Image (tube, grey):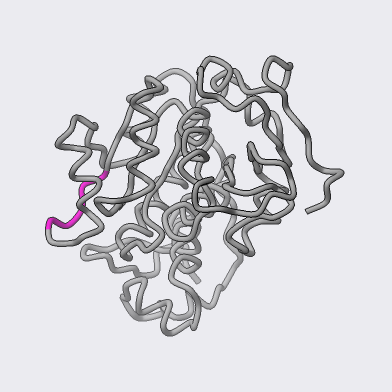
C-alpha cells in the first residue's frame, strides 16, 4: 500500500476517533487509509467478529448481518481475518454500506493477503495502531481486538470456539461498556461453544440485524440503496429450474463459498433470488 495514502492520527488530535479517545487503553496513535469520515463519533458502528473457520451457517450469518447493518447506515467494524470477518466486510460492501478493517500489522504489511484489501481501502477504511512497516505477530491480534471493540457501540459474535480471539474482543467490549451480542448455533458443533458461553455469561441473544439496529440505534439509522447485482449472472443460470444450497452453488460455479454467499445476498436484496426453507435458494420473480 502506498505510504502517501496513509494518515497518522495522534491521540488528542482532531481526526482521532472520539470513542477511542474516551478509553484509557486506547492507542496513542493510529494509522489510517481510506475514508476517515467513518471514524466520526456520530456514526453508528457495530463490530462483527467470529472464527476464521466458520460453518456455511456462520458465513451466511456474517454476510447477512454485514449487509443488513450496511443497508441501515451502520458502520461495520471487523478485523479482515479469513472467515467471519471477511464475510461481514463483504456483505456490508455489497449492500452499499460502510466498513472499517482493523489490522494486526502495519498498513504497508497487511495480513492476511486478500483480494478484498484494495476494495476496503477504496470504499471503506483500513486502520492500525502499528507503524506501517510492522509485520503481523501473534501478540498483535489481542491488542488489535481492543481497537475493534473500542471503535464500535456494540459487538456481535458469530461462531467462535471456546478458546477464541473473538472472546477476547467480547471481553474488551464488556470492559469498555459496549453491548455484547451473540448468535446461537448448533449445540453439537465446536464453533458454537464460544458464543453459547458468552450467552450463559450474560451476552444478549440476537437473531437479525434489524433487531440489532432497533436495540442500539432506533433513531440514528438511514436506508442505503443496495448495490445492484449484474444481470444474468452465472449464479442465476445455475438456479434456473432448480433449488440449491450455497455449497452446491459454490461447487457448480467452482468459486469460494464466501464469494457465492455475498452474491446471493446481493441477488436476494434485488429480489432476483429467494431464500427457501432449509438454507436453499431459488430464482425470484426478478431473476433472469
Q: Nearer the viewer, residue 152 or 217?
A: 152
What range is drawn magenta here? 183-187
Q: Residue at x 56, y 73 (%)?
A: 232
280 above or below 94?
below
Q: Is residue 195 left or right of residue 134?
A: left
Q: Is residue 12 magenta?
A: no
What is the x, y in percent for residue 27? 60, 27
Q: Nearer the viewer, residue 182 or 4?
A: 4
Q: Nearer the viewer, residue 189 or 253?
A: 189
Q: How many marks?
A: 0
What is the x, y in percent for residue 248? 35, 79
Q: Quadrant of residue 207?
A: top left
Q: Is residue 236 left or right of residue 157?
A: right
132 above or below 151?
below
What is the x, y in percent for residue 271? 44, 57
Q: Residue at x 43, y 60 (%)?
A: 83
What is the x, y in percent for residue 82? 48, 60
74 above or below 82?
above
Amino acid at each position: 500500500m502506498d505510504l502517501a495514502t496513509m494518515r497518522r492520527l495522534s491521540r488528542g488530535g482532531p481526526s482521532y476517533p472520539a470513542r477511542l479517545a474516551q478509553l484509557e487503553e486506547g492507542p496513542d496513535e493510529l494509522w489510517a487509509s481510506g475514508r476517515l469520515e467513518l471514524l466520526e463519533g456520530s456514526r453508528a458502528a457495530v463490530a462483527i467478529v467470529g472464527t476464521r473457520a466458520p460453518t456455511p451457517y456462520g458465513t451466511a450469518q456474517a454476510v447477512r448481518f454485514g449487509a443488513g447493518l450496511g443497508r441501515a447506515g451502520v458502520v461495520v467494524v471487523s478485523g479482515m481475518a479469513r472467515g467471519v470477518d471477511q464475510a461481514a466486510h463483504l456483505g456490508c460492501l455489497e449492500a452499499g454500506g460502510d466498513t472499517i478493517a482493523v489490522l494486526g500489522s502495519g498498513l504497508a504489511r497487511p495480513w492476511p493477503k486478500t483480494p478484498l484489501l484494495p476494495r476496503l481501502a477504496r470504499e471503506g477504511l483500513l486502520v492500525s495502531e502499528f507503524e506501517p512497516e510492522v509485520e503481523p505477530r501473534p501478540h498483535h491480534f489481542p491488542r488489535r481486538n481492543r481497537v475493534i471493540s473500542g471503535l464500535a457501540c456494540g459487538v456481535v459474535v458469530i461462531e467462535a470456539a471456546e478458546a477464541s480471539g473473538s472472546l477476547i474482543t467480547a471481553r474488551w467490549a464488556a470492559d469498555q461498556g459496549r453491548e455484547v451480542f451473540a448468535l446461537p448455533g448448533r449445540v453439537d458443533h465446536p464453533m458454537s461453544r464460544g458464543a453459547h458461553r458468552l450467552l450463559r455469561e450474560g451476552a444478549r441473544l440476537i437473531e437479525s440485524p434489524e433487531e440489532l439496529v432497533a436495540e442500539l440505534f432506533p433513531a440514528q439509522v438511514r436506508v442505503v440503496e443496495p448495490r445492484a447485482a449484474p444481470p444474468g449472472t452465472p449464479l442465476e443460470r445455475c438456479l434456473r429450474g432448480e433449488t440449491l444450497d450455497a455449497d452446491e452453488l459454490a461447487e457448480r460455479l467452482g468459486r469460494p463459498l464466501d464469494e457465492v454467499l455475498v452474491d446471493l445476498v446481493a441477488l436476494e436484496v434485488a429480489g432476483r433470488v429467494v431464500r427457501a426453507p432449509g438454507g436453499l435458494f431459488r430464482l425470484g420473480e426478478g431473476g433472469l
